[in-house]
Amino acid sequence: MHADNLARKAKLLKASDHFINHTELAPLIEKQSIFLVLAGKKPASQATSSKWVKADHTAHAEPDDPRQLRELLDSLDLAYRLSADDYATNVLVSLESGKIDDYIAAGEADDMAAIGRLFGYPQTAIEAFVRDDCMEPNVQDELMEAAGISAVIPSFRFSKTHAQQELAVLKDWYQTLRQHGLS
């Protein structure tokens, strides 16, 4: 994708009132997941969008209007599939509609390796996840912190034996997000 077009899409996505995570730690993580697809770093990704509704002394999430989400996703030239529950509107995005079909088929087959590939995870990390042989989360967090990578970006579990190569993928994702003002 042409750099100017990608920068325009980053601005559209960042300015949108949709795909905002309601936690203070990771307000951009849903937008980051979508942008990494736009940037060609991930074949597919998923994100959620909701609004925070305050009533009396309580608050809860409600799904965002699918029509408004379609308008935004269409303006980003993404293929997508929307679904909703009582709390959020969920979206699966890709630059290619066939990848969405692939994800649905992988989900129905419970093929975690195929889903990992579609989400752009390194094969070594996928294999470790499938074998339940991943690096401990606190060790991974320390490794990411030492590399200057925020722990609140879209990521995956590292393998115990190929963590440095897998860290390089996250560094690339993080640099892409920072370059476009989404970190």
Image (spheres, rainbow, N blue to C red):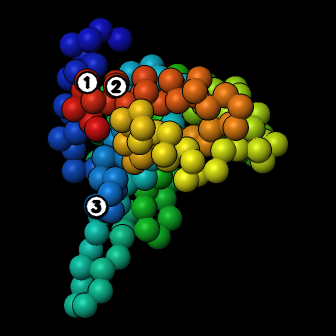
Provide the secondary structure element on which disc 1 rests: helix
Is residue 21 visible in the rendered structure shown here? yes
Q: Label 2 belongs to which residue? A: 175
Residue 62 percent location from the top left of the image = 36, 68
Q: Amino acid at mark 3?
A: Glu
Residue 97 percent location from the top left of the image = 55, 26
Measuring 42% from the left and 61% from the top, which residue is drawn there?
A: 88
In the rendered image, the vertical position of residue 61 relative to residue 150, given as above or below: below
Disc 2 to disc 3, C-alpha distance: 21 Å
Disc 1 to disc 3, C-alpha distance: 22 Å
Q: Amino acid at mark 2?
A: Gln
Is residue 113 visible in the rendered structure shown here? no
Image quadrant in which you'd find residue 8: top left
Q: Residue furthest top?
A: 2
In which quadrant is the N terminus drawn? top left
Q: Label 1 belongs to which residue? A: 179
Q: Label 3 belongs to which residue? A: 24
Provide the secondary structure element on which disc 3 rests: loop
Q: Are marks 2 and 1 in contact (CB under 8 Å)?
A: yes
* Dot 1 crowding, Cα within 10 Å, few <14, some 14–19, many 20+: few
